Amino acid sequence: MAGSFRQGLHRIIGYSTHSNNRFYSSRRLQDRVAIITGASSGLGRAIALRYASEGAKVVCSDLRPDAIEDEVSTHTLISQNGGRSKFVETDVGSEESVQTLIDLSTQEFGKVDIMVNNAGIAAEAENPTPIYETSADTFHSTIRVNSFGVFLGCKYAGMQMMKQEPYANGDRGWIINIASVLGLVGKSGTICYSSAKGSVVNMTRTAALDYAPLGIHVNAIAPGFTDTPMISSMAANADVKAQIDAVHPLKGLGKPGDFEGPAVFLASDDASWITGAILPVEGGYLAQ
């Protein structure tokens, strides 16, 4: 079944990134239940598909199941290739909606092992704006999704994990937050996005300390600029894309597939003594 699942994904979605060669048979997440917010496209879609190929039961969460017209939805693609998946419409900035996500996931699969808080917005990607011209509404809407949404995901997924019996090694769950290099360094014109992602960085560290005595890991991945719908309009401009490539010494602009392996690692037993870590996956962006 594992081989047919991976071959099916490769055939249907084409995996044009490095992930063409990243199909493993280890089944490192076998029978674990994973929720991924923002699973309909970009990093969330790539992580969801990889988790399924590693044996996880995947709950795909987003505002809509098909982010791109005529594209097979993430949860449908998983199911078509022999995996188990469910879609739950979720507004991550709504406490009630996130609670419902956790409840429906638990009802469907009996538990929640992994929570990937990936959903995010970036109004400034198309229109970089200095702080003195940024509207309060734009700031609030960005914080609502990119910071408050992560808080809710950490809180309610963690509360469910606390109810569950630990694994033999004492672990009860794995929470992975998607931060950004702009949560670690600043960039002019991105006051909303950078502030929200900076919040995610320290939220991850603090939540890790709160949950550590309970056997729940909390870590974050900090992506560099990545070829996803979020920045597609920027990358469409050849001059802008060249500038983005230039500040990522290793291979230029990232691809969604670059985050699959790190996301699996942080949700696996290989990360048994890791919590509160911020893992940059950014092609050398921060090395300069």
Image: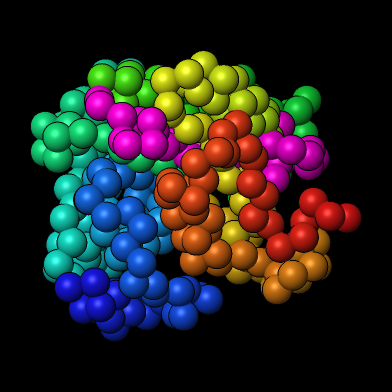
Q: Is residue 170 magenta?
A: yes
Q: How many marks?
A: 0
Taking the image as drawn, is residue 142 in sight?
A: no
Residues rendered magenta in the picture: 164-192
The residue located at (78%, 39%) in the rendering is 185
| Residue 36 image-quadrant placement | top left
Q: In this view of the protein, which residue sits in the foreground, 6 or 251?
A: 6
x then y, percent, for residue 32: 27, 46
Position of residue 272 relative to residue 216, above or below, is below
The residue located at (53%, 76%) in the rendering is 18
Residue 194 horizontal side relative to residue 57, left or right: right
x then y, percent, for residue 137: 55, 22
Position of residue 51 relative to residue 159, above or below, is below
| Residue 9 image-quadrant placement | bottom left
Q: Is residue 221 magenta?
A: no
x then y, percent, for residue 29: 33, 53
Question: Which part of the image, by quadrant, shows the N terminus?
Answer: bottom left
The residue located at (74%, 38%) in the rendering is 184
Position of residue 243 relative to residue 147, above or below, is below
Taking the image as drawn, is residue 182 in sight?
A: yes
Which residue appears farthest toward the left when viewing the image? 107
Colour convention of the picture: rainbow
The residue located at (41%, 41%) in the rendering is 116
Magenta span: predominant SS is loop
Which residue appears farthest toward the right when viewing the image? 288
Residue 98 horizontal side relative to residue 275, left or right: left
| Residue 114 image-quadrant placement | top left
x then y, percent, for residue 225: 65, 56
Residue 192 horizontal side relative to residue 87, left or right: right
Question: Which part of the image, by quadrant, shows the C terminus?
Answer: bottom right
Position of residue 183 relative to residue 155, above or below, is below
